[in-house]
Image (cartoon, helix red, strand yellow):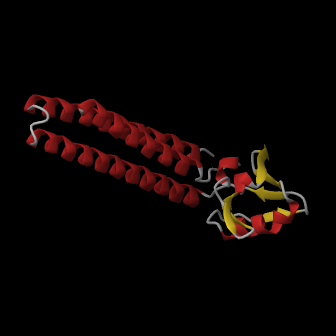
Amino acid sequence: MIKELMRNTEERMKKTLEVLESQLRSIRTGRASPALVERVMVEYYGVPTPLNQLAVISAPEPQLLTIRPYDPSSLDAIERAILSSDLGLNPSNDGKIIRLVIPSLTQERREELVRMVNRRVEEAKVALRNIRREALEKLRDMEKEKEISEDDFFRARDDLQDLIDRYAEEAEELGKRKSREILEV
């Protein structure tokens, strides 16, 4: 019973870190990365669709992204979606390909992005603590219902703390790595 609870808790913590990773990947650094625009939602025949399902996204140069739609008629919709996103990029299209020039970041913008990274990391840590709290409540209920002994409860509580420490540290490391990448000139 405790093992199953711990397994489920760890699975939820892993998913929280995966979400954090994908959020951090979409934050702009000084160089072009297809992950920057992959999740931009494009209104395609009335259905919001991620850009990576509508086009090939590549980074032929460190400061340039090219987007080649599978369906040339979707070019305008893709361009509108990029303009309306919070990326702050101006697409230029030649009728077949959309080019996105990634400007160098100013120091002020870099610091703003680092603050955003720190905010996302903190949100992930709060989510991890909420997962721990829910698991702890379940453990307390198990103990009250005499499903587990008091010793088992304390052992499981310590294991749970070790688990959250490990995942919180991993979240911190992801944030530090992204911050270093952003501050790199």
Depth order, front residue of 144/123: 144
Left or right of 112 in this view: 91: right
Quarter of image, res 43: bottom right
The residue shown at (70%, 48%) is 34
How many numbered discs, if any? 0
Left or right of 97 in this view: 4: left
Depth order, front residue of 156/146: 146
x, y percent for residue 120: 45, 53
Residue at the extreme right of the image, as rendered:
95
x, y percent for residue 8: 35, 38
Left or right of 37 in this view: 58: right
The residue shown at (57%, 60%) is 109
Depth order, front residue of 136/67: 136
x, y percent for residue 85: 64, 66
User: Can residue 33 be seen by looking at this rendering?
Assistant: no
The residue shown at (14%, 34%) is 153
Depth order, front residue of 16/103: 16
The residue shown at (21%, 44%) is 138
- Position of 2 relative to 21 (above/below): above
In the rendered image, the quadrant that contains the N terminus is top left
Quarter of image, res 71: bottom right
User: Can residue 24 be seen by looking at this rendering?
Assistant: yes
